[in-house]
Image (cartoon, rainbow, N blue to C red):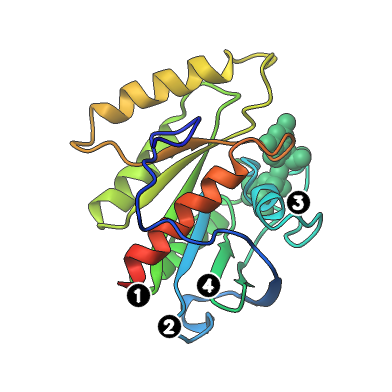
Amino acid sequence: MVLPGSNVVVGPCAGDARIKEVEFVKSSSRAKDCPKDDRPEFAILGRSNVGKSSLINSLVRKKEVALTSKKPGKTRLINHFLVNRSWYIVDLPGYGFAKASEAARMDWSSFTKGYFLNRDTLVAVLLLIDASVPPQKIDFDCANWLGRNNIPITFVFTKCDKMKAGKGKRPDENIRVFQELIRQNYRQHPPWIMTSSVTGLGRDELLLHMSQLRNYWNQ
Ligand code: GTP
Ligand code: MG
């Protein structure tokens, strides 16, 4: 069965996807300082303001587990949340924050790149793409960098509720164009899924997909 609003096929590996409890563990400013244990984790990555923290709150069904803001640049550290005492969700600072100084941007890349390259327990990166705006080069640059470093990604389209996107085109059109561009770069199309933190669209599907990835990883 293919999950609605995605290209994810559910197989025998899909397990219990429910989130029963979530606990904030710590904020780290360096990859070295992240929790040291062998529980699997998912990193939430994407442009500043794409909805990373909102997605985490939607997945765990709590309003303010991860702090959100209308102003970009709210999340500045690597934040670990422990789910069901068995796996982590990691909220990361956004990239492409135009107002950040050059030095702050360089700092972002060295510290998050350090995290990606050294985190053995990373199951996959959920790369969030704003579906309410046309495809952005910076998102492809990021996807390509992760691909070159063999880090598995799932594209998570956010803000799919914004059907009458002001300036941009409609989300379904933006997603179509985005996927067309991805197809030119990947032999195998990575998993993708449509979500909205406002309506809850795709929440259960994404949790099921993550449970499947965890179970593969655990094997
Ligand atoms: P940084 O931490 O600054 O990198 O941002 P972030 O990616 O964590 O974004 P955040 O979750 O703080 O959300 C940014 C803004 O987008 C907030 O005003 C949210 O309310 C809004 N937003 C997030 N997700 C959605 C969504 O699914 N639909 C709509 N309509 N708005 C959303
Ligand atoms: Mg955030």
Local crowd size for mark 4, using a 10 Å CA cut-off: few (<14), some (14–19), many (≥20): some
Q: Which label's residue is closer to the chain start, 3 or 4?
A: 3
Local crowd size for mark 2, using a 10 Å CA cut-off: few (<14), some (14–19), many (≥20): few
Report the side of 110 relative to 24 (left or right): left
Residue 8 position in % (x across, y down): 39, 40
Residue 170, picture quadrant: top right
Q: Which residue is mark 4?
A: 87
**Amino acid type at mark 2:** Asp
**Amino acid type at mark 1:** Asp
**Amino acid type at mark 3:** Thr
User: Which residue occupies the foreground of this view, 132 or 12?
Assistant: 12
Q: Which residue is mark 2?
A: 38
Image quadrant holding the C terminus, namely: bottom left
**Amino acid type at mark 4:** Trp
Which callout, 1 or 2, points to the residue nearer the camera? 2
Which callout, 3 or 4, points to the residue nearer the camera? 4
Q: Which residue is mark 3?
A: 68
Q: Which residue is mark 1?
A: 120
Which callout, 4 or 1, points to the residue nearer the camera? 4
Element type where label 4 sits in the image: strand
